Amino acid sequence: MNNFIVKYANRKNALVLFGLVIVINVLLALSMGGNPDLKPLDMQLTYDAEKAYELIGAYNESERKTYILVELTLDVIYPIIYALLFSFLLFMLHKDVQIAKFPFVITILDFIENGGIVTMLVNYPNELHGVTRFTSVFTTLKWLTLGLTLILILWGLFKKFKK
């Protein structure tokens, strides 16, 4: 992993990854069918079982199937792409491979979250409150870790432009 980051962390690759992040975000938005009432659990900071199943209940059967498909395809690729982007940015800013590996924690948290969401969607209308609590913890940890990653990027930019 260290050699990979050192070898490929450059502006060109970061720009390619940034472009992929934009494309995937557009595809994720399109997968919701333009329905503003559909709020993915992935995009919540936290939720309890009542809120989770209220959100899931807003989806019809076809939309739930699409959500499952997206979780098992696009949302498997997406965490890898954004982790690589953040990793490359952190390495370019801090020149520290250990700091640059931090965004992959988000990927692991995102994968666990996705597994929980798929479990809830597949089992709907049965409400799995234990799975919901477990999944919500990983959703919140994902967002907190992402926030910390963005702080590290901003800190690196501050240091770079302070010189």
Image: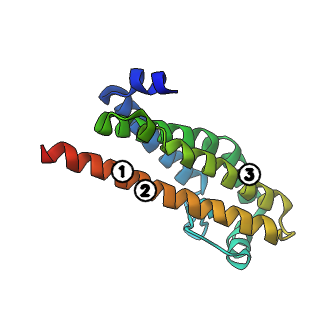
- Residue at image location 59% in from the left, 66% down from the top: 39
Distance Cα–Cα, label 1 vs label 2: 6 Å
Instruction: Judge from the rendering whether residue 85 lies leftward or rightward of residue 75; answer left or right.
Output: left
According to the picture, the residue beneath numbered tag 2 turns out to be 148
Q: Position of residue 1 (x, y in %)?
A: 52, 27
Horizontally, residue 10 falls left or right of residue 111, namely left
- Residue density around tag 3, few if under 14, some if 14–19, many if 20 or more, within 10 Å: some
Q: Earlier in the sequence, mark 3 or mark 1?
A: 3
How far is disc 2 from disc 3 in space, using C-alphas? 23 Å
Element at badge 1?
helix
Horizontal arrangement in the rendering, residue 95 relative to residue 54 (left or right): left
Amino acid at pointer 1: Leu
Q: Secondary structure at mark 3?
A: helix
Amino acid type at mark 2: Leu
Q: Residue at x 65, y 65 (%)?
A: 137
Which residue in the structure is indicated by mark 3?
A: 115
Q: Earlier in the sequence, mark 2 or mark 3?
A: 3
Q: Are marks 1 and 2 in contact (CB under 8 Å)?
A: yes
Query: Could you say where residue 114 lies in the image, as x and y percent from the top left?
Result: 68, 52
Q: Which residue is mark 1?
A: 152
Picture coordinates of residue 142, whole percent (x, y): 56, 56
* In the foreground, 31 or 127: 127
Task: Give the residue displayed 60% in from the left and 59% down from the top.
Answer: 42
Callout 2: helix, strand or loop?
helix
